[in-house]
Amino acid sequence: MGGTLTEERKSEMSQGIMMGRVGTREEVAALMSFLLGADAGYITAATYDINGGLQVS
């Protein structure tokens, strides 16, 4: 498994996501960059769902 999603599969997956699209690796990287930086120095034991609202919809 692994690799790149086809446009057809992305379209199928996005139907169940509130944002209407799949996320990008850049969006995940942006959160990781923040959490690894000094601005997140007081954050502990938190869970961040990067799923575009999949669990809400």
Image: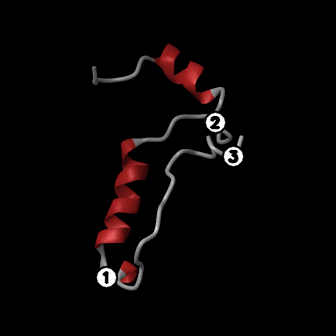
Position of 12 with respect to 24 (left or right) is right
Pick whichever, 48 or 52, lies toward us.
Answer: 48
- x and y percentages locating residue 52 in the rendered image: 58, 45
Pick whichever, 28 or 7, lies toward us.
Answer: 28
Badge 3 element = loop
Residue reaching furthest to the front: 45
Q: Disc 3 vs disc 2: Cβ atoms closer than 8 Å? A: no
Mark 3 vs mark 2: in front: 3
Amino acid under disc 1: Ala
Residue linked to disc 2: 17
Residue at x-position 38% and y-position 59%: 30
Q: Earlier in the sequence, mark 1 or mark 3?
A: 1
Mark on residue 56? 3
Q: Earlier in the sequence, mark 3 or mark 2?
A: 2
Amino acid under disc 3: Val
Residue linked to disc 1: 38
Position of 20 with respect to 10 (left or right) is right
Q: Is residue 29 above or below residue 44?
A: above
Badge 1 element = helix
How many angstroms separate mark 3 from mark 2 (CA)?
A: 8 Å
How many angstroms separate mark 1 from mark 3 (CA)?
A: 30 Å
Q: Earlier in the sequence, mark 1 or mark 2?
A: 2
- x and y percentages locating residue 3 in the rendered image: 28, 23
Q: Is residue 34 above or below residue 3?
A: below
Badge 2 element = loop
The quadrant of the picture occupied by the C terminus is top right
Q: Is residue 16 above or below residue 38?
A: above
